[in-house]
Structures are given as C-alpha cells and as structure tokens.
Amino acid sequence: MNHILEIIGLVLLLIGGTFLFLGGLGILRMPDTYNRLQTGTKATTLGGMSVILGVGFLEPDWLIKTLVLVIFIALSNPISSHALARANYKRKNYPYLKGGKEYDKYREVYQKEEEEETA
Amino acid sequence: MEKTQTPSRTASFILAWLILFLTWLMFTSTFATQEVVTGLITSLLIALFTSRFFTCCNLSIFSPVKLLYLIEYLFVFLWALIVANLDVARRVISPKLPINPGIVKFKTKLTTDFSKMVLANSITLTPGTISVDIIDDTYYIHWIDVKSLDPEEAKKDIADKFERILLKIF
C-alpha cells in the first residue's frame, strides 16, 4: 500500500515538474504579455497542483491539507492572471496580433473613452 | 450591476459558518472533541462578522440536483484543465509557435455576479483562453488561436459547456 502511494506521489511530482518547466519555456518563447500569461497561468496551475498533491501522497498525513492548498490555488491563480491582463491593457500595452486590428475587439471600449476625453 | 436574487442574511451566515468550519476540519484533520468545539466557536465568531461577504448563493445550493450539477461541473472543469495544459505544451514545444492571438467578445446569459466570476475563472483555465474583462454581460477574452471573430461562434467554442451547467446551478 505504501509503495503504491509513493509511486503515485512520484509520478505526480514528475508531471508537475514537467508542466512547470514547459510554462517557463513558454514565458521565454511567447511574443507578448498576454500569450505569456496564457502559458504561465495554465502551466503553473496544473503544475503547482500536482506537485503539491504529489507531496501529499508521499506524506499521507498531509494529504487533506494539501487538498486545501490545491483548492486555494485553483481559486486564486485565474484571478491574478485576469487582473494582470486587464491592468496591462489599461497601460495601453496592446496585444500582438497576427491577423490585423480587427482581431482585437476590446480596443473599442477604450477608444470610446479616449474620444470622450478628447471631446 | 443588477442583482436578480440577493440571498438573505441568515442564508449567507449559515453558508459562511459551514464553509469556515469545513476549512477548519480540513486544516486540523482530526475529530478530537476539543478541536471540533474550538473550530465550531471560532468559525461562528468569524461568520458573524464576515457573512455579509458570502453573497454567492442561496441555501437551495444544497438541493441534491444542484449538488450533482456541481460535481459534473468539477469533472468538466478538471478535464478542460488537463486539455488546456496539453494544448499549451504542444504550442510551446513546436518550433513554429503556432499562435494567432486576438481578443474576442461574447455575451453571457448568466445574471449573478458570482456565477459570472466562476465562468470567467473557468475560461481562464481552459484551452487557449484568458478572460481580460467583463463589462455587464459582455466578456472580453484573449484567445491564443482565434478560430472565429463572430461572438456566437466564439462563445460556442469557449464557454458553452460551462455556461450550460452554471445556468442550472445559480
């Protein structure tokens, strides 16, 4: 029984480590902030979750506590990425667009505000 | 922002107490009498002061049908999270960097603030999308590989599987 738990824990640690590494690689390779957030958020959520759960499986006494941590990560990670993306747009740091300007539907919200300011 | 249903003070108080007490139980992970009693009292005190922030849902959330939908939502969400990570991994590793980013918008049918937040968070953790802003009932979503600029088509791809369940829960 202990062996099975240990194997599950180690596999989870390996999966988590791999995804965290890929997330880091993504942050290096992506062209702009929004795409970096894409890789950053998703990879750190699943990577962090499975690393923490893996530790929980290796030390069964901590399993329930690690579950609480996993829930907190799932709740807080997307909120922080959303806040970063929105703040970034408010700083007029516009996204990299391959297909031209019509691919950015969010621009119109701020264009209206800018027009009101100048008028 | 409009609110169709504001839960009563007692409902949010009971919910707050329950959630806080469950968190306490999970953190102490024991059923020793003194621990449980201490937890009951502290969570009661905290719930008294903070229950006005727990405006997420009525007590009808405990009906079995809604609980079943919650469990279904959990599984749909976990599956989407795993797919999202494989998708990101594929894009990061492939040498050509196959992305076509853009920000799309669509309208939601959800009415309460809390359900909108849950949907936005789910969208952030699912393949290729992060939510940038919500204005009233319009979502602005950054999509790493835009397949359609039409709001209806985009919504079908991004949000429909979550919204369908959330409409039944909240």
Image: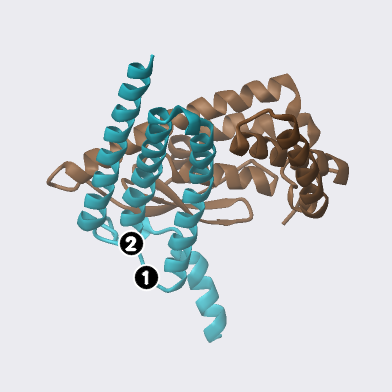
Q: Is residue B45 above or below residue A49?
A: below
For the N terminus of chain B, the quadrant is bottom right
**Cβ atoms at labels 2 and 1 below 8 Å apart:** yes
Q: Is residue B133 above or below residue B95?
A: below
**Residue at x-position 68% and y-position 28%:** B31
Q: Nearer the viewer, mark 2 or mark 1?
A: 2
The span from disc 2 to disc 1 (Cα, nearest Å) is 9 Å
Image position, residue B135 (x, y; %): 59, 58
Q: Nearest the camera: B105 or A70?
A: A70
* Res. A54 image quadrant: top left
**Horizontal arrangement in the rendering, residue A48 relative to residue B38 (left or right):** left
- Type of the residue with mark 1: Asn
**What chain letter is assigned to the residue under label 1?**
A
Chain identifier matching the brown colour in the rendered picture? B
User: What residue did someone put label 2 on?
Assistant: A33
- Name which residue lies at 52% across and 66% down: A109
x then y, percent, for residue A12: 33, 30
Q: Is residue B59 left or right of residue B74?
A: right
* Chain holding disc 2: A
Quarter occupied by residue B60: top right
Q: What residue is disc 1 on? A: A93
How far across and down, in percent of the image, does residue A103 sit? 36, 56
